[in-house]
Image (cartoon, rainbow, N blue to C red):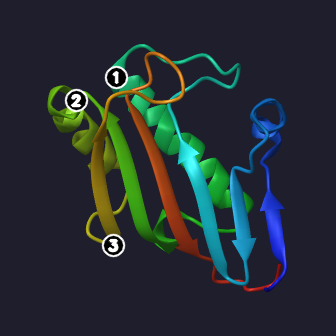
Amino acid sequence: MPDRQILVPDSMKTLADRAGYAPAVKVGSTVYCAGQVGRTPGLEVIADPQAQFVAAWENLRIVLAEAGCTFDDVVDMTTYHVDMSSHMAVFRAVKDRIFPRGTCAWTCIGVSELARPGLLVEIKCIAIARDVTP
């Protein structure tokens, strides 16, 4: 198996230590990003749906940047939604402002709950880094 590089942005070290997970793992040029949610840097869930969705995208952007990637490098994305029918229009509007449309495979899954009460979405993706050095 090729060497893997564990990627932990500085702003996520506390969360990674507490939860015992890697925000991303890079194997060769492939970057596997763990699901990102809408929380503050202090790990508090953001109550307002639109603000929570913006924060989830920003957290994903931070993880991708740690790997030397941008949203343009994402090839596959899965989003997990609590109460999807109530929030999808707002989520899609935020996504369309922040993330390039039609550039990757995207699967949406409705779930009953996420890791913490109040979380409405989790965004997970795979990206291909242009620089293949680990």
Compared with residue 1, is residue 38 higher up or lower down, i.e. above or below? above
Secondary-structure class at tag 2: helix
Which mark, residue 49? 1
Please identify the quarter of the rendering in which residue 43 is found: top right
**Where does the image place residue 81, in percent across and percent down from the top left?**
32, 37
Residue at 63%, 78% (x, y): give it: 30
**Pointer 2 and pointer 1: residues touching (CB < 8 Å)?**
yes
Compared with residue 34, is residue 87 higher up or lower down, i.e. above or below? above
Whole-angstrom CA distance, mark 3 to mark 2, is: 22 Å
Whole-angstrom CA distance, mark 3 to mark 1, is: 24 Å
Few, some or many C-alpha atoms within 10 Å of disc 2 (few <14, some 14-19, many ≥20)? some
Pair 3/2: label in front: 2
Secondary-structure class at tag 3: loop
The mark that comes first in sequence, 3 or 2, is 2
**Where does the image place residue 26, in percent across and percent down from the top left?**
72, 71
Residue at 83%, 78% (x, y): give it: 134
- Give the amino acid at mark 1: Pro
Few, some or many C-alpha atoms within 10 Å of disc 1 (few <14, some 14-19, many ≥20)? some
- Give the amino acid at mark 3: Thr
**Residue placed under numbered mark 3 in the picture:** 103
**Where does the image place residue 123, in percent across and percent down from the top left?**
45, 47
Q: Is residue 102 left or right of residue 64?
A: left
Q: In this view, does 88 lie to the left or right of 62?
A: left
**Residue placed under numbered mark 2 in the picture:** 87
